[in-house]
Image: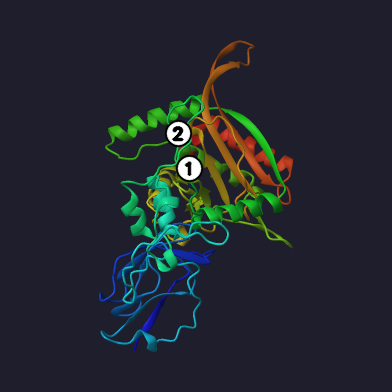
Amino acid sequence: MAKEITMPALSPSMTEGVLAKWHKKVGDTIKPGEVIAEVETDKATMDLEAYDKGTILLIAAPEGSKVAVNGRIAVVGEPGEKVDAVSSSSPAPASTSAEAKTVTQTAAVPTAVVVSSSGRVKISPLAKKIANEKGVDVTRVAGSGPGGRIVRRDVEAAQGGGSVRSTAGIFGGKPIAQDGVRPVSQMRAAIARRLVESKTTAPHFYVEREVDAAPLAKLRASANVALEMAGEKLKLSVNDFVLKAAVEALRRVPAVNSSWEGASIRQHGAVHLAFAVALPDGLITPVIRNAHAKDFRTIAREAKELGAKAKAGKLQPEEYTGGTFTVSNLGMIGVERFSAILNPPQAAILAVGATVKKPVLASNGAIVPGERMSLTVSADHRVVDGLMAGEFLKALVEVLESPGVLLM
């Protein structure tokens, strides 16, 4: 009996997914546990595994289409079985690109450019994306899709002779980029929703301090030499020290490790430490679970492993949810100081700037060379007040200026 394959909820906040890639086609046999496609969620691109065995009879959601959770994406059954026998009570795809290559589609002859009543050129999302990337003027491309809609093959065919739209720079040189728009990805849409929610509902305030980073730089250099001599592949970064220091500061001021829950404030007994990782279309915050119970080297290793998985789009939901405190570091790209937006429902986030060499005033009144790093806490004033945020920063500075304690 034919069965539907529907869009699963691959992350806690997922409401729809994009079929990024099919690994199977109509007529292929599949078995339970076999990866049949890749789905872009609001957090990462994840493998979609088959739950049933059989032959793929229909692919209802082609690559590039956006499908609501529980919406039909394919049908599997016995060879030759009629797909019409399957009743679909699940939601239809949220949007489907016209280049669906199913058993019922036939090639169409290109027609003149078709414009909707609103004046927009009719073009599929995937074709629009490719056109923007390749610099193809879609107003000069004839569509061969349903109703004259421009589809992927039309854009690819027009690449050689397509008109490139550009705007010269103010000095008459090459344009900085091709004009155009790009669809909002699942990740960017989720980031937009959460940041608007955070900034408009949580009363942010900011507390900043500078830390003497010279002791940290000296310890890091000597520790990496020792690790290299011992044959260890681990290389410690400034961020590794900051992550561990944040855990120790939370141990001293545990009230910062809390969350706002409307009618109550939840105090977390464990530190599930999140840290921001930049991705091409946004950022994600992997979580080092029970960081309070882990030594410095374990935290450093886990941070690198989770960071690599995040950049490869392979994080599982349990690896990026449930954080109780977040660290965001832009120091590696030279940003000296910034303020981060809260990661709800967490009550605080730490922004870390670059280490800067500057003249400083010594205790004896002399001006001497120094190294300083900016630390800024953004806090939810419903949970954390100014004194508490200041105490946390004080504890953090004390630990970072005597970083040897982090290796104990």
Residue hosting label 2: 175
Task: Please say if 165 is above or below 151.
Answer: above
Residue 281 at x, y percent in the picture:
47, 48
Q: Secondary structure at mark 2?
A: loop
Q: Residue at x 73, y 44 (%)?
A: 385
Amino acid type shown at disc 1: Asp
Residue 270 at x, y percent in the picture:
56, 55
Do we see residue 394 in this rendering? yes
Task: Please say if 168 is above or below 305.
Answer: above
Mark 2, Cα crowd under 10 Å, few <14 / some 14-19 / many 20+, is some
Q: Residue at x 54, y 58 (%)?
A: 322
User: In whole angstroms, how far apart are the C-alphas of marks 2 and 1?
Assistant: 9 Å
Q: Are marks 2 and 1 in contact (CB under 8 Å)?
A: yes
Residue lying farthest to the top in this orientation: 366
Left or right placement of residue 281 versus residue 308 in this view:
right
Quarter holding residue 219: top left
Q: Secondary structure at mark 1?
A: loop
Residue lying farthest to the front in this orientation: 112
Mark 1, Cα crowd under 10 Å, few <14 / some 14-19 / many 20+, is some
Do we see residue 310 in this rendering? no
Left or right placement of residue 159 versus residue 275 in this view:
left
- Comparing 385 with 59, the one in front is 59
Quadrant, the N terminus? bottom left
Left or right placement of residue 391 versus residue 160 in this view:
right
- Comparing 311 with 363, the one in front is 311
Residue 98 at x, y percent in the picture:
41, 66
Residue hosting label 1: 179
Amino acid type shown at disc 2: Pro
* Chosen colour scheme: rainbow
- Comparing 62 with 143, the one in front is 143
Q: Residue at x 47, y 46 (%)?
A: 277
